Image (tube, coloured by chain):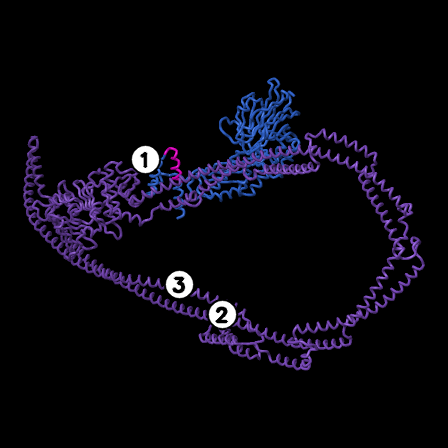
Chain colours: A blue, B purple
Amino acid sequence: MASHKIRILHTADLHLGTNFSSFPDREVRDILRGEQSNILLELTRVVKAEKIDLVLIAGDLFDRPDLDQQIVNRVKNNLANLDCKVHICAGNHDPYIEGSFWATEWPDNVHIVPHTEVESYYYEDLGILVDSVSFSDIYSINSLFTAAPQTDVPVDTLKLLMLHGDFGIEDRKSSYNPIPISSVKAQGYDYLALGHIHLAQEGNLGFRDAQYAYPGAPQGRGFDELGQGHFLVGTFTRDSGLGRYNQEWKKHILNTRPFLIHEINISDVENEHEIQQAIEEDLIQWQKTKEFDLKRAILRLVLVGSPDLKFNISLGHLQEYIKSLDYFYVEIEDKTKVPLELDRWSKHSGFGQILVQEYEEQKEKALPEEKERVDRALDLILRAHERTINET
Amino acid sequence: MKLKRIYIDQFGKHNSLLINFENNFNLLIGPNESGKSTLLTFILTAFYGFNRYSQRRVERNERMRFTPWSGSRFGGHIVFERDNTTYRLERSFGETASKDEVRLTNEHSGKEISITKRMEPGEYLFGLKRDEFLNTIFIGQLSTAMEKDEDIRKKLMALKGGQAMDTSIHEIEETLGAELREISPPRAKGLLQKAEERLKDLELEQQEAMDVSQQARKKRADLDRAQAELSRIQEQLKDLKVEQDIRQIELKQKEFLDNKERLENINKIDQQISEGLEELSYSSMEEMEEQDDLSKAEDFINRWQKLEAQKENIDKHNKSLIKKQEELPKKDELERSLEKLNTFSKDRRHYIKSVEEIRKKSDEEKRLFTENLNLLEQNIKTLRLEQERAKQRAKTKEEHSNLNESIKQQNAQKIHFTEELEKLEQGIVEKDQEIENINLQLNKQLENFANQIQQQKIEEEQQIQELRIKEENKQQKIPFSIFFVFAVLGLLGGILYLLIGQGLLTITLLLFGIALILFVIGLVDTFKKFKKAQSRSSILEKIAAIEADYQEKRKNIEGIHQEQMHNLQAVEKELKDQLNSIDKEKTRLLVKIENNTNRLNEDQNKLRDLELQLNQIKQNLQVENNKFKLPKEFENSDNPFVTSVFQKNYAKAIRVLEQDTAQNSNTQNDLIELEDALNQAAEELKSYEYKPSLELIKEEDQTDKDCKKLLEVLYKPPFEIENVDLDSDQMENEISSRISEIERKLHDLEQIKQGLKEQKEVKQKNEKEFLELRAESQKGFLKVFAACKTLTEAETYYKKKVQQINELKNLHGRKLDRQQDIEKQLAGVDLESLEKKLLELDAEIKQLQDIRSVDYQDLDLEVIDQQLKKLRDQESLWHTTTGNVQGELKNIYSQTRMLQEIEEELIHTQAEWEKLSEQVKDYELALEMIKSIDDELQKSFGPQINERTAEILSAITGEEQQGILIDGDFEAKLEDAESKMLREAAYFSSGKIDQIYLSLRLAIALTLYSGADGEILPFVFDDSLVQYDKLRTERTLAYLKQIAERENRQIIFSTCHPAYEELMDYAHVIYLNQK
């Protein structure tokens, strides 16, 4: 077994069955829902291409514990088609509940980790031991992983720990299975497969080259989960000299729709047409830096700068315009400011002079942390002033 | 206003001082202590007196300062021109204000102008209070900060209100307020409140999710308990089942034993059956079945008994039939009655049918009439409606024509007004022409005068010129005194020759000679010159006389000219007055015309509306006419009602209306006629009653006649009946019941007859059968009854035999039943195998007894069964419970969203809420700022004063224009060039402050006290630029000059610096130290 390579695919937080209710457009929701299940098809391809031995799904495979049986059945079918073993633990979104879909029959190659205790599952043919525990509830203030169970397996067994929860919590409290590093560090595991945090992160456990990783969510579900997701593909090679496994990880980037936030400075524009142009050009420039098609992405464009406009920017109109350029989903936020030309204002007799005076006084009077508020208040006044001027 | 002259009789150090001012710039120069300020104070006190409102002591001091040493009255007068009129203001001061005397007179007419005692002439003339005067146009030496003058402030504020500011603070405030309200309105739910609520909801939801989780845990515990209970029950069930099995096996054993016993019993019965058969001399049951003797005997006995019974029955029946026959009446009697009744019935029906037909016809007629009547009434209603419409139409038309009339009148009026206007304009043109003519004339005259003067002047000047030329010619001749010089030169030359010594004496002598000659000539020339000088002075005198003469003449001519000019101006003024009045008249007419036109437009609009209304009515009429219908039969009816109502009134009404519709016009008369017709028609309709038509009556009579004969019969029915109508249903019933009764009786009679006949036949048959049976019995009995000789014997034997057979059959049946039963239970098992089975069961019991954990031996099977049943119930109950709990657990989270999702939204909403709160604070600060800006602006006088002050300051200082803000207390703030911040005036140098306030005063004075309807008042400066450097002074003076020129404003400027005279070469200079 010395030269044998073990190939593991690690993923988590697929949240299948999410309904994307934050998108007001029904068509968009339907598309996103439909695309979610594509992740499993991609999984099938990767497993075949990478000759994966074992797939680890570290919790939150599903978005809810009471999903439609249809969705679960589709997943079962997809997993049954995988030419490898699949090890799944339940997360806080899909806790293992008596009578739930976890308690139903799953394909032979799929193992569901029970929720009652920490389970040691030994794949004798692969020489892999997976310790794991499932969530039995939608939250868990206490650490689910209490201690590694004692098992009698050969010395050269690859030892994995798969947990869903907040890793690295030492003193801070968490409602989602806090996992102090100390509790897992020196337990003899080669790799800690984590789930729950949607932002990918990885590191060294600081014990015999053992590593840990959150693979992140393969498909973002909002603007707090930006960019493209991936699967982690690891190769373990036994170093009999050191008596441990060398591991090598790579990311298999998924062709899912990314959520992206992008700022566009429109300080130099003077009219609506120029705003449209500025955005369009900026998008073209931005596209050049990206490998995937931005038109597929879910975009939030933030307008910044201080253009000298005599009107209010019509966001809806702009949004429609960008959509008409075949962008899948665009929302636009206006964070522009009215240009602050105190010189010009101070030349204004009456109002302008006093406004500048008042501004300076307030600014001087304000506490350091409130100084920006004075700027904002001035901006509000100037906006209101422009509006009243435009109305009259 | 222009000051013309001041005369100080006695005031301070001045006495008998007369000063004339010019219209534009007056420069009063005098050294210190020369009384410049006193002079200016006199101007102030002449217009306003001494300040009575300040402290007495100061006032007294001020008064004392200007009181002459002698203590006598002091004062003087000011002559000034205002609105082309010259006034004279005289004032003499006493010891106190009450002793002061003021007099304002028209300088020309000397007429006194009365001023209320409470008012100083300055207030009366300028509309300025004393302080206002001092704060604006009277600018003293130190023009630092202005006094807080409420009157000026009020005027400035009023000025501010009158002009629009570039930005409405309130609009900004409103916009901000509206935006803030969107986030956080005072009462309704805003975004902030919604976020707050959402937060609360989310916290609740979070709690709920936790609760659900708690519930799930509880459920899970319940599930564990239920599952434990279930397994306990299942254990118990198992034991009980074993026990039950044992008991059942034991039961089976017992059953086997029973069967064994039964088998033995059957064998016993078999033996008994064999014995019975033997007795009955049958070898087996089968043989017994085969014998039919007994049944034959039975049959015979039965037949005999039946015949006996039949015979008896026939007799009985015959008797009853005969009795019935006797009770019924005779047949022919009944038939007669029936015929009578039938005839009556037929006649009656015929009659009723005839009557009904007539009634039907009458009803139809009535219905038709009622329908028509209704139609008529409806039509009348429609007609009334139309009548209303017609009235309406007439009214609308009248209105229409009235309006037309009014429009015509107004048009006429308009034309009239326009004509008048044209006339007036003609007048204006004429007047303009007149003025033009007069002007032309005047100009001509002026030209003449000017020519005259010019000519005279030219002449005179020519004269003077000639004289001058003459004299100058004389002067220009070479002066003869030059001969002396040559003489001396000759002499000197001679001497020189002589001195050199070597010269020729002749030449020397010659030179001397020439010198001598020249000397003589010089003497003669000098004499001549003296003579000429004498004659030149006389010529100069002459020239002076001519010039004086010329000046006098010119003055005369100018006097005449001026007089004529005055006259001309008067005429022109009169004409202008006339023009003005014409203009006023014109304006009045234009207003009238405009009003008239407005009214006209209004009326025309009304007219259009009315026409629309008329069209509408017309359309309605068309629609209503289409609805209108007339019953056909009314048009050519001979019914008197129809004739009276329809043809007379109704048709008339329709005609009137049709006419109206057709011509679209009607007269009042038509309407009245229509009204009458309709009323009459309605009246007659009301009185109308239905009367049958003649035809109907005729037909009725005929029917009566036809039925007369019948009636005679009919009213006497063939039965007795009281108070029943012939055509009533009761009669019908009576007749038919009677007929059917008779028919029934007839039928009965027939049947009885038939019955009697049949009975006769039956009796005969019965008797025959008896005979046959008797013959048969005499032939002897069958084999079985061989021993029996009579029927009775046979009967007894038969009974005994039958009993024996039945017993045997019964026994055999019982045996067969039992046998079947056992065979079923044993299923073909014989006794031997039964024994074996029993042994097996014993072994089984023993085995089961070993399995069971609890011994239920003391319990009955029944109890065990009961317990089992109970346990099974419990089991299924617990099973259901666990299933339910599992199901509940499975779906428990469907009640809530995922906790994490809620918490994420909670964080999100919290952030949102904080953002909104920040925004609210931003808005509040913005509003606060706006409010304070508003307050600040309220205090200041707005941009006009600020800008004007800034402009003047820039003009005075020559610096770039800086922002200036003047607040309500006349405190000025100036923009600091470096920091661009507005700073209090005190921040700047005193020189600058002086300039700022001078600028402010001028700005206020120029803003408030100049313009179209405001009197342009003189500015008085009392050495105001004393602190200024030369450059600023020059700039200030240049600015003042500009004002003076631009506004034709008189400026009186006093200074102690003689250098000003040089600076202001354009000014009228008054030296105060030189009287």
Mark 3 or 2, nearer chain start: 2
Question: Are labels 1 and 2 on one chain?
Answer: yes
Q: Position of residue B148 (x, y in %)?
A: 24, 44
Identify which residue, B877 or B935, lies in the foreground.
B877
The picture quadrant where one finds residue A328 is: top right
As shown in the figure, which amino acid type bears the numbered disc 1? Ser
Assess whether residue B29 is covered by the magenta stretch: no
Q: Do dots 3 and 1 share one subunit?
A: yes
Task: Report the mark closest to the observer, 3 or 2.
Answer: 2
Residue B355 in sight: yes
Type of amino acid at the residue the image marks with label 3 = Glu
Q: Nearer the viewer, residue A122 or B977?
A: A122
Marking on residue B979? 1
Q: Quadrant of residue A72?
A: top right
For label 3, the crowd category at 10 Å Cα-Cα, with few meaning under 14, some 14 to 19 and many 20 or more, is few
For disc 2, the marked residue is B385
Residue B297, horizontal then vertical, whole percent: 89, 55
Comparing B39 with B724, the one in front is B724
**Magenta region, main secondary structure:** helix
Horizontally, residue B1074 falls left or right of residue A41, namely left
Q: What SS does tag 3 mark?
A: helix
- Residue tagged by mark 3? B602
| SS category of the residue bearing label 2 | helix
As drawn, is B504 to the left or to the right of B1061?
left
Per the rendered image, the range of residues in magenta is: A367-379
Membership of A374 in magenta stretch: yes
